[in-house]
Amino acid sequence: MRSLSVFGATGSIGESTFDLLQRQGGRAAFRTVALTGGRNVARLAEQARALGAEVAVTAHEECLAELRAALAGSGIAAAAGTSALLEAADRPADWVMSAIVGAAGLAPGFRALAHGATLALANKESLVTAGPLLLAEAARHGARILPVDSEHSAVFQALVGEDIAAVERIIITASGGALRDWPLERLVQASVADASRHPNWSMGQRITIDSASMFNKALELIETHEYFGVAPDRIEVLVHPESIVHALVGFADGALMAHLGAPDMRHAIGYALNWPARAPLPVARLDLAALGRLSFQAPDPLRWPALRLAREVMASGGTAGAVFNAAKEVALDSFISGQVGFMDMSGLVEATLDKMVARQSLGKAATSLDMVLQTDAEARAVARALIGQNKD
Ligand code: NDP
Ligand code: MG
């Protein structure tokens, strides 16, 4: 029986994963090793009971008593905190879903590779902050990383049976997010609620806001470059409001292979769960005649400066991705808490990158996970200080 763990089980990706596991036989079909969550302890316990998990872990120490109470009598172990997350990742499992949001998801996924797990990687921050380290760790232990981001799953599928050397370009699509059709001059006034209404996808709040600012696509450009090893100038972003075509791969002979599907993350998750086989999935089937038309447009650099920043990060290499992601997380936190405006986020990220360049700590490749985490902490401190200065 296949064993598995889900990191970030209570989130949007985690819930979709749980849904598929239940539909594919639940505890009769899988041995669940660990499930982890954050503050939603009641839901974590519910999932752990349903799947008969060995251990349930909350990221927060102060939630442990509540988790224990919710699991009373079940025989499922409860644990809390960062070290408990890592211990859960050390428990061997054949398949591990990495779906914690943010840089916090990096270390658990990295640890799971050490026992040769197939890592279903939704946490794009892992590749952005530590791509080369993560891929080297997977290679060292004979582990496999399967992309779960919809665009990257689409590219992965378009490449089945193909030679990566024949790839001329990769195009990832972007819906444009909640504010795509707002007049440019109005964007400075966008509220958290405005930016949180995604036109097509139902996702966690953070990635939804990142879709409106295109920071999500900026991360995905870097993710594409890291995962597939394709040069940055061969990776393009295309705005596609309907979110039906997820990515396209162009080959040396001019052929363009597109992946189409309803905007439902259960496709990419299910593909990674059943790979290399394809199993029936509960996603809507497309009716192209009913859709009528699909539209595409080039992204506006003034509206979405995050895309230019991602290209600068890829050109810089080294730890620039870790700085970029950390600064982006601080900027997003500050937007959500009302400290900075929607259009201030990219300025803050750019200023953080500039400061870190001045410290000459960018360009160097990270040689360890600790170095990545240290860069992450340093960049967060710089970004927070910049916010403090601007308020004075
Ligand atoms: P959510 O915010 O919905 O869920 C995040 C999960 O991580 C929850 O289980 C949450 O626990 C847990 N969590 C939050 N903070 C921490 C922390 N500091 N330490 C440990 N666990 C924590 O996120 P999504 O599911 O939307 O996204 C997860 C990842 O997948 C992200 O990296 C995102 O970029 C990526 N992704 C998501 C897509 C989507 O459609 N949602 C699409 C493609 C990629 P709790 O809720 O209990 O507090
Ligand atoms: Mg995506």
Image (cartoon, rainbow, N blue to C red):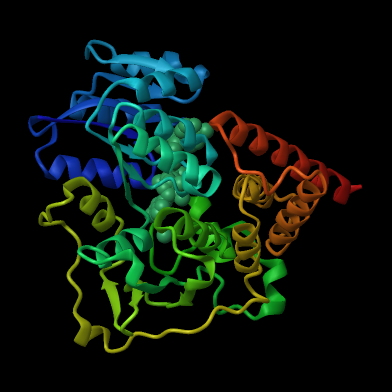
Q: Would residue 348 be seen by someone viewing this image from the given angle?
A: yes
Q: Residue 233: horizontal and vertical position, in percent?
A: 53, 71
Quadrant where ligand 2 appears? bottom left
Q: Residue 165: horizontal and vertical position, in percent?
A: 35, 67
- Residue 236's place in the image compared with 151, above or below, is below
Residue beneath the point at 47% across and 77% down: 239
- Residue 372's place in the image compared with 251, above or below, is above
The quarter of the picture where the N terminus appears is top left
Task: Residue 316: name its quadrant.
Answer: bottom right
Q: Residue 27: horizontal and vertical position, in percent?
A: 12, 30
- Residue 281's place in the image compared with 12, above or below, is below
Q: Is residue 38 left or right of residue 317?
A: left
User: How many circles with numbers are drawn on the protein?
Assistant: 0
Task: Residue 77: name its quadrant.
Answer: top left
Q: Residue 344: horizontal and vertical position, in percent?
A: 74, 60
Q: Is residue 349 left or right of residue 176?
A: right
Residue lying farthest right?
392
* Residue 7 or residue 132, whichever sits in front: 132
